[in-house]
Image (spheres, helix red, strand yellow):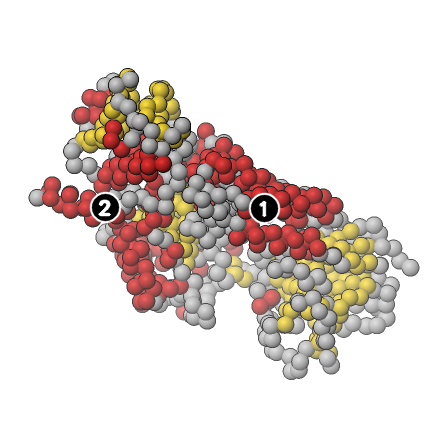
Amino acid sequence: MLKICLWVWLAAIGSLALGMDTGVIGRIYPEPQKILAEYAAMPVGPENVEIIFHPEIPSPAAEAGRKLYRRSLQEMAAENPGHPSGRLEVHVGLCSDPAIAEKFGDRVPELPEQGYAIRVIEHSPAGAVVAIGGSDARGIFYGLASLRQLLEARDGQVWQNLVEVDDFPVWPSRFVSDYFSNASLDGFQFLAANKIGGYGGLGDSNWRKPEWWEQVEPIMRDMKAMSDADLLTFLMQFHIYATPAGGPKFNIADRKQIDEFIECCRKMAQHGVSIFMIGTDDSTPRGVDGYEFYHADEAEKFDNSVGRAHGYLMKCLYEALHDEFPDVQFGMIGAPYSFDHGIGRPEVDRYLIDWAAEAPEEVMLVWTGSSVFSPRITRADAERLRKLVPGHDVFVFDNSNGLFAPMPRWNTEFYPGMEKDNRGIVFLLGLVFGSRPWETVYYLGACDYLWNPAAYDAVRSYDTAIAMMYGPQAVEPVNEMREALVAAKDKRATNNRAGFAACYDRFSKAFEALSKVRDRHGNPLPVAQLATWREILEEYQNAELPELAIRPAAARIELDGRIGEEEWRGAAEIQLLDRSGRPDPAPVTMKMAYADGGVYLAFEVPAAKPLPEQAPLPHDSPVYLNPDAIEFLLQFAPEVEPAADSEAVGAFAHCAFDLAGNRFDEYANYGGHSWDGDWTVKTAETPAGWSAEVFLKPSDLKYAKCVPPREGTVWRGNFHRVENRTGKVQSWMPAGWSFHQAEYFGIIDFIGGE
């Protein structure tokens, strides 16, 4: 009966042909831990290779590995028929199986999970005998995947390269990601075939809708088949505050909502999800005194502690599902998930301390490192975080790709031994299934690093990933495109217009060359995303930046919101343009002067009456979303050099206020608590609308020292009025798709008096 069931199971996974195939490369990738010996390659074809399992009926993972190898061999032989010679006999099983142990003799290695070993038992002109032993079922699959990678086509013949190797991943749980609804069986198989190991599905608010579950039911079936076969490990990310447009926010005080969420997670666990990563990040309200609730009954139930409420949610989830799914793990992306979110401040630390006290110790905390897009994770930072959540493990939600790099290459550094501190778990944020195709190449390189950090070489790994995806002919033009793009982006981001023209010319030539490259199947390489960047760079190439000459204040300016003619006499004056770039029939007038170690700004804002009512708000509330707001962005230094940290580029202050004088400020666009500036605003109602006066003293920004306003100083900046009640936007420099593009900031020259 058992044998019948196993064969039924193998038939059921017959569709797991491991499609979405990349090309084989003639060597093992990711870089293996140890290559012990190399032997002369032998010519092979489907007819002279036999794979023998021990025991005779293989595990689903082993059978999937055989299918993967045979399919690649058949496809390569069809294009390179040659003349295979001799016989290749491959014995496959667990290292603990007596038959495999006998083949290995005294060379049976001790391997961690997912490990495998390859030994060449016999080798002669008549053929070869190879043994593949795995520490577990996944290890067997990876051993056969490596044997498949060792296939190589040359001179019209398929060759099997033969090596002896001991190999295993340093990071067992390597999760790449995409929106769950974008997943497919082909995609899952692609990840498994390339030893990526884990897929993290990005859920959204649709989990509340029955029709969403109907849509993803086929994906869930495929996910369960891959999980049951131990070909892939699955993680799901759900953000509790993600809601349909205008929908109510999750209420942790409402047990019915908690039970609905538990049932959502139960369905996923029943279909193979083994880690849940629950998000509260970026959407948890925060005031001056710490994090805040969306609902009053939450504040009452949890003694006004948001950390305690989030910990309680994880407690409910863990207690409801742990007994039913004892191997499932739980983690939460807390409201502060990097030190840039203010970890170290009492009100932020209180959130983490309360969370840790409420959540079961088995629940992990998820973070991104010192910054949102950390290019490195240090032991010191990790220890600082753990002290705030004693008893809880942590793991990394890696944002270092930054989501915005069109041709990213893995260059992030984790501290040695970090995998042991993180249960071998790391989650890589991005989109793996084609909507940003160059991220697939990035993921291959990232998992090369995670497999064997000590041997990782960024350039070699990237080149190998390109060759796997598109063929060796693509390596040189892709690298030229990437280098040209990076150079042009750096010039643009740091506003180095003097050197930009040459970089843009190089980029254009590389783009044209890459557009002509074809992969091994004759298909063009993906350039749509790069075409968008061509438009972005071309816009910058053609942009003419405005300039403004600022004089010292001619008179004492009294900050009361009312713009007196005498006190603002001689100040520089501009009118903001409609965001389309055309003059506005009712423009905002801005004036600017300097004195007292800072700058004075005045805004005359035409607005329809009556003005909308606006209540006082805590500092750093999102006032830019209020009915009528002014935003200004200032770079207190003439130049900002690029740095390894993606946050360094374009260091600037972003300040916003509304007609009631509510204020918000941040460094770049990294959150209202990343920087607090020294500035004051006063507003007043006028017959034509409202007005405002601002005084700001510059202060140092992360990665940039401020240069105070004085004769000869140069700043850069931009000014905007956002009338959210009508959708109207006015700007000094209207170019770019975002206010935060420092490369489009105008030039502010501080000159002497008349």
Choose between 47 and 111: the one closer to the eye: 47
Which image quarter holds the N terminus? top left
Specify few, some or many for label 2: CA neighbours under 10 Å numbering under 14, 14-19, or 20 or more: some
What amino acid is found at the position of numbered circle 2 in the picture?
Gly
Question: What is the spatial separation of the Cα atoms under label 2 and label 1, in whole angstroms?
Answer: 42 Å
The answer to which image quadrant residue 63 occupies is top left
**Numbered tag placed on residue 276 in the rendering:** none
Which image quarter holds the C terminus? bottom right
Residue 16 in view: yes
Residue drawn at point x = 83 percent, y = 64 percent: 571
| Residue 621 x %, y % | 57, 64
The answer to which image quadrant residue 419 occupies is top left
The residue at the far right in this view is 754
Residue 374 in view: no
| Residue 553 x %, y % | 84, 62
Q: Earlier in the sequence, mark 2 or mark 1?
A: 2
| Residue 665 x %, y % | 63, 59
Disc 1 is placed on an element classified as: helix
Residue drawn at point x = 57 percent, y = 54 percent: 532
Name the residue carrying label 2.
Answer: 14
What amino acid is found at the position of numbered circle 1 in the picture?
Phe
Disc 2 is placed on an element classified as: helix
Name the residue carrying label 1.
Answer: 511
Specify few, some or many for label 1: CA neighbours under 10 Å numbering under 14, 14-19, or 20 or more: many
Residue drawn at point x = 78 percent, y = 51 percent: 714
